[in-house]
Image (spheres, rainbow, N blue to C red):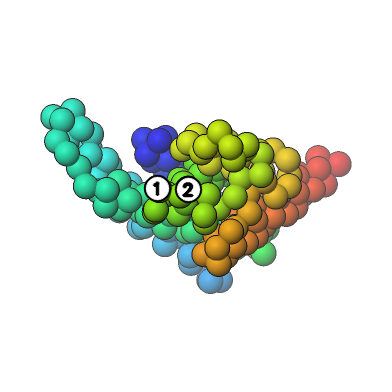
Amino acid sequence: MFAGLYGLSNLNAEMLRRAVGADSKLQASPSLVADSARLISNHLHPLMMAIGAVWLLCLAVAIVRKRTLPRWAFDAAGLWFCVRLVLEFLIINGLIFQPALVQPGVLLGQIVVYLPFFVLNWGWIFYRLDWLHPIQPGSVIRLSDIDPERGLSRFDYFHSTVNTLINKGKPTITGVSRTGRITALIFNGMLLSLYAVAFARILQLTKATL
C-alpha cells in the first residue's frame, strides 16, 4: 500500500512540477498561490520524494531480512503520506482561485491522479484510528455498507472509502466517538472540495473548446 501511495503522490507532484516549469505566467506571478506552487514543486517535492524513498527502502530491507518492526515504523510512513495528502490538497484548491496560472487540463489531470492517492490514504487513516484498540474495532468509525456482525477487516475501510467516492459523497463512513466524527467531517469536507474543483475545471475546459 505504501509503495502505491509513494508512486501516486510522486506522479501528482511531478505533474505539478512540469506544469510550473512550462508555464511562464505561473513562474512570473508574485501571488501567494504561485509562490506556494513553486515552493512545493521545486523544493518540497524533491526533498519529500527522497525522504520517502529512503524510509520505504529501509522498511523493505527489514521485511526481507525478517526483522521485527515496531508499529511506529509503519505509522510514521502513514503520517508522512498524510502530510503529502494535505500539501497536495491545498495546492490543488489554491490554484482554483487563480485559474489563469495553470491550464485547466493539467489541474484536472492532477485531480484524477490525486483521487486514488486520496482514497488509499484515507482508508489507512480510518483503519488506524479504529484499530488503535483492536479489541473493539468499530468504536471510533462506523462503516454503514459493512455488516457489523461479520467483523471488520483492513480491506473494509478502503472499500468504504472507495464507495463514498463513487457514490458522490454518500456518507458510508460515519464517526462513533468524537474523534471519529471530527475525522469523518474532515474527510467529507475534503471530498466535497475535490468534487467542486473537478467540476469547475471541467466547466473551464468546456468553455475553452466552445
Q: Position of residue 26 (x, y in %)?
A: 55, 59
Q: Which residue is mark 2?
A: 137
Looking at the rendered image, the quarter that the N terminus falls into is: top left
Tag 2, which secondary structure? loop
Q: Position of residue 74 (x, y in %)?
A: 30, 46
Q: Are marks 1 and 2 in contact (CB under 8 Å)?
A: yes
Front position in the image: 91 or 77: 77
In the image: residue 200, left or right of residue 137: right
Q: Residue at x 39, y 53 (%)?
A: 133
Local packing at callout 1 (Cα closer than 10 Å; few below 14, some 14-19, many 20+) is few
The image's mark for residue 134 is: 1
Front position in the image: 111 or 83: 83
Rendered position, 112 above or below 103? above
Q: Residue furthest right?
A: 210
Q: Residue furthest top?
A: 64
Q: Residue at x 26, y 52 (%)?
A: 72
Report how many numbered discs are placed on residues in the image: 2
Q: What kind of residue is marked 1?
A: Pro
Q: What kind of residue is marked 2?
A: Pro
Q: Position of residue 63 (x, y in %)?
A: 20, 32
Task: Answer whether residue 128 is visible to the viewer in this image.
Answer: no
Q: Position of residue 39 (x, y in %)?
A: 42, 62
Front position in the image: 182 or 76: 182
In the image: residue 192, left or right of residue 41: right
Looking at the rendered image, the quarter that the C terminus falls into is: top right
Q: Residue at x 35, y 57 (%)?
A: 43
Q: Quadrant of residue 6?
A: top left
